[in-house]
Image (cartoon, helix red, strand yellow):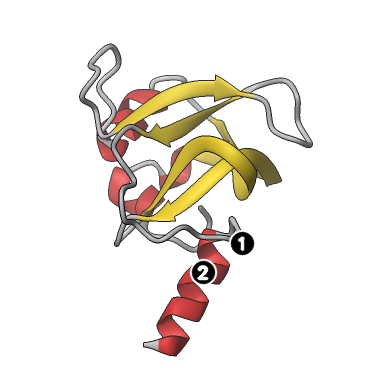
Amino acid sequence: MQGQPGQRLAGIKDQLTYVGPCKLTGSLYDLGEYPGLVPGPGEVMGQIFQLQDPNTLTLLDRYEGCIPGEPSSLFVRRRIETIEYPAGYWVYLYNGSVGSRPPIQSGDWIGYLTSRTISS
């Protein structure tokens, strides 16, 4: 997401063009340093980016801990529709158990991070 270090850390900051905000159907959980999106009820705030080069997906997969075809990957990449953009976009779904991880009821990771920082 914009304003987060992931694009820089993945080495793709200059390979993406921001398209706009979106809403996804699913549930969001606090996994510590990052959120985990899982299928479920609710709305999750997201952002859509256009890739300048399709090979950028390989770098994103590596950053997200996604090994295509590997059932034990930390995240799996799936094509889903968003509420605003029904064309279908890639998203990374958390592939582990959320167990006792705190749910992010608002579905807004950035807003949640802000409130988590203020209350610490």
Spot occupied by residue 54 in the image (x, y as percentages of width and height): 46, 20
Looking at the image, is mark 1 or mark 2 nearer the viewer?
1
Q: Residue at x 36, y 87 (%)?
A: 120
Q: Are marks 1 and 2 in contact (CB under 8 Å)?
A: yes
Q: Residue at x 25, y 18 (%)?
A: 71
65 on left or right of 107: left
Relative to 102, say whether 7 is above or below.
above
> Tag count in the figure?
2
Spot occupied by residue 61 in the image (x, y as percentages of width and height): 32, 29
Spot occupied by residue 30 in the image (x, y as percentages of width and height): 39, 58
Q: Which residue is mark 1?
A: 106
Report the Cα–Cα distance between label 1 and label 2. 8 Å
Q: Residue at x 46, y 38 (%)?
A: 38
Residue lying farthest to the top in this orientation? 69
> Which sits in the foreground, 48 or 79?
79
Q: Quadrant of residue 66?
A: top left
9 on left or right of 22: left
Please indicate, yes or no, whether residue 48 appears anywhere in the rendered image.
no
Q: Residue at x 75, y 24 (%)?
A: 86
Determine whether the residue tagged by mark 1 lies in a helix, strand or loop: loop
> Which sits in the foreground, 27 or 92?
27
Please indicate, yes or no, whether residue 69 appears anywhere in the rendered image.
yes
Q: Amino acid at mark 2?
A: Tyr
The image's mark for residue 112 is 2
67 on left or right of 60: left
